Amino acid sequence: MKMRRLSGLAGLFFMFLGVTLLGGRVQAQDRCRVPSMFSDPEMERVQREAFEIWMKQKATEEKMLRQSRSFLMSAEQEVIRIPVVVHIIHNGEPYGVGPNIPDEQVLSQIRVLNEDFQRNNPDKENTPEDFRSVAANIGVEFVLAKQTPEGRETTGIVRIDGGRTSWVDITQNGSAGVRAEREMKAMSTWDPASYVNVWVANIGNNIFGFSRLPLGDLGGLGGSFSKDLDGVVVSYQRFGSEDHGAFPSLIHDETNKGRTLTHEMGHYLGLLHTWGSGESNFSCSSVNDYCDDTPITKSGHSSADFKCDHPHVGGCGEVVMFQNFMDYSADRCMNLFTEDQKFRIRTVLESSYLRKTLSSSKGLEDASDEPFYDLALKEVTRPVIVTGFGSSPMEITVENKGRADVSSFKVVVNSESAGIGEVEANVELELPSGEAKTLNLNWAEGIIPEGTHTLEVRLEKPNNDVDENTSNDAKYIKFTQNKLVTEVPSRENFSETPEWSVAYDGFVSPILGKKDSLVGDMTKVAYGNGMWLVSPLLDLRGLVESSMSFKYRFDRKGEENPSGKIEVLLSEAVPENYETSLFSTDFDSNTEEWRSVFLNLSDYAGKENVRVAIKVTGAGTGIVSLDDVNIYDTYGQKAHAPEGEIIVYPNPLPGNSGKRVLHVTANLLEEQELKVYVFGSGGYKLQEAVLPEALNHTRLLNFANYPRGVYIVRVKSREFTKSFRVLVK
């Protein structure tokens, strides 16, 4: 074997790369070219010189390692696995036609790569005896990527409609070729630090393929480095092997066994042609490919020159190693890499920029079984179950249950009953995997009609992609639009069409009846859902105090012990939120009788847009009844008169004139006019008041200016007259 000098690296650099760095490209049909990785030729020259100096240093270190005891005791060499992604650039042809080659053809090519780089190629028996001692198993396994850079499952094969019949201009000299190359690769490129990018396209017949060379472990490359162009390009007519299938695109007998990619992958991993670059001042004594175990040779060899017959003597008097994968021989003639080539390749994979990270790429690992995109509509908190404010803003909580972070998605809202078709909202929101966020949306323009409506809310298109789990994308809710405003005092006893809204969670109604009382069968609702009784908007302006009362009972159904609860919630917000709890109690086995609840609402006196809701929840329980819901305009120990009665209090009135205010409270069965009179001891009328639509009203009478004594208070309606003796101390 030859000995080569490592002097004159700058000259060697131009000898090998002159045709690409200085603008020249192969014009006649040629097997490959190696384009520049830098836009600045001087930067390319400096980096290539540095690369070979770096490689020489690595060779010295390797020699010392081979002489060490630790190396002699080391285990068999490790197979280095690297992920490959194949980008098939076609022009809209059907699958398997023209450049849109079938998957089987890609698989045949990967098989050839692995056979050639592991010296498992069937034709290795054709390696001449002269070269068998240096023939090497490189120990590299090429694996079609199993997951994308984003973590999604992949076959490692990407198909792109490039919109062009031919990419032959990619082989042109100068900037025109670089522009075409950049255009094609920009359509589909994966991180070159984690994947070997291989593009397969119609690039004409001037060259069969080309590759980008690696760099040393060098920093400070700057913006001139064309990282986005790193990878290998191969003609679709020379990609794959007829030894492993019948592929119509393999029309060239010289290149139908997949060795074009083997050759280009050699460049990608740091190998030069066996003759260097062969410029005009080539000397047989010059350094060529920096591999001492490849014979000196003056140029590439075509099988047409000698029909792969061995031995063949070259221009430097050597026996040509045309069987080397880095020559230009026909595919059928190639069958080996050498030990020195192996050293360069493994050194590049272990230490070189954009190559040393390939073996740790997640592209080698199976993608997770968990969905990549999985947005869940966790909750719809608005519209609330009963509302009355115009278009009713929407509040939803979205949870990202997928593996990928999400920055955008679509919310689709539909409510035919409210007269609203599908409304789409494009949402931009940073939502990392595993997190949930609440957002507000204006989903309806104009006023929603009165009544109960069904609303569908659905999530779509996370990051403009497909949600892989649609089971949690949508929710259907029911809400009631009730804009009725009522003055206080008021009552709901269900004797007529109720003013209070009756609603329920879920889509199975628990309502058994609304005549004389509201009755609900809680065995019909899911756990946590229930029945709602919600007041109209209450106008408490002008009041200084207020209160409410209602009755409830619970009747067990069967032998099962009761469960669930009854709550009183209040909202003073616009829109409603029912976040204030006024009362809550659990059902128990002793509630099979009517019970009364009295609550103070005085904290909300003077306010408008107040709603009160009685919510009953439970499942597998029994029958719940509600009745006689009253909102009063006062609060006190005696504020709630018995049904059908009128009471006056306090009696006697205190001696302090500033506190002499008499309450006249009615709790009538139906609205009617009441007249209230105050008479002195001599029968003189001192005061008169009219309550035109009295129901459960309280009228305040001022006794501050009356002296001590006994007074008669008379309350008169169309049905009765009641008189009360009131003592002023």
Image (tube, helix red, strand yellow):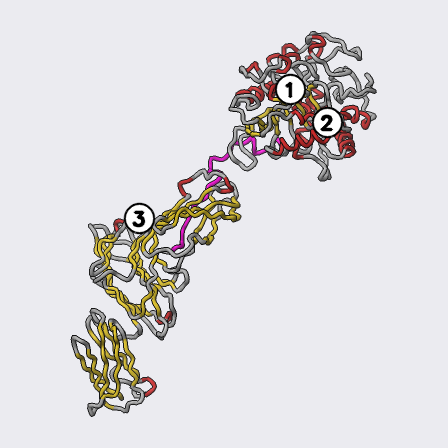
Residue 170: name its quadrant.
top right
| Residue 515: in magenta span | no
Residue 671: name its quadrant.
bottom left
Lower position in the chain sequence, tag 2 or tag 3: 2
Circle 1: residue type? Thr
Closest to the observer: 633 or 275? 633
Closer to the eye: label 2 or 3: 2
Residue 703 left/right relative to 6: left
Give the magenta-colored segment's residue range.
357-383
Residue 173: numbered disc = 2
Q: Give the residue displayed 30% in from the left and 53% down from the top.
A: 504
Q: Give the residue displayed 29% in from the left and 86% down from the top.
A: 703
Can residue 303 be seen in the rendering of this structure?
yes
The vertical placement of 278 against 218, above or below, is: above
- The residues tagged by marks 2 and 3 sit, at their Cα atoms, a distance apart of 70 Å
Circle 3: residue type? Phe
**How many residues crowd mark 2 within 10 Å: few (<14), some (14–19), many (20+)?**
some
Q: Secondary structure at mark 1?
A: helix
**How many residues crowd mark 3 within 10 Å: few (<14), some (14–19), many (20+)?**
some
**How many residues crowd mark 1 within 10 Å: few (<14), some (14–19), many (20+)?**
many
- The residues tagged by marks 3 and 1 sit, at their Cα atoms, a distance apart of 65 Å
Lower position in the chain sequence, tag 3 or tag 1: 1
Can residue 296 be seen in the rendering of this structure?
no
- Name the residue beneath numbered marker 1: 260
Asked if the residues shown at circle 2 and circle 1 are in contact, with their CB atoms under 8 angstroms apart, the answer is: no
Closer to the eye: label 2 or 1: 2
Q: Secondary structure at mark 3?
A: loop
- The residues tagged by marks 2 and 1 sit, at their Cα atoms, a distance apart of 21 Å
Lower position in the chain sequence, tag 2 or tag 1: 2
Q: Quadrant of the N terminus?
A: top right
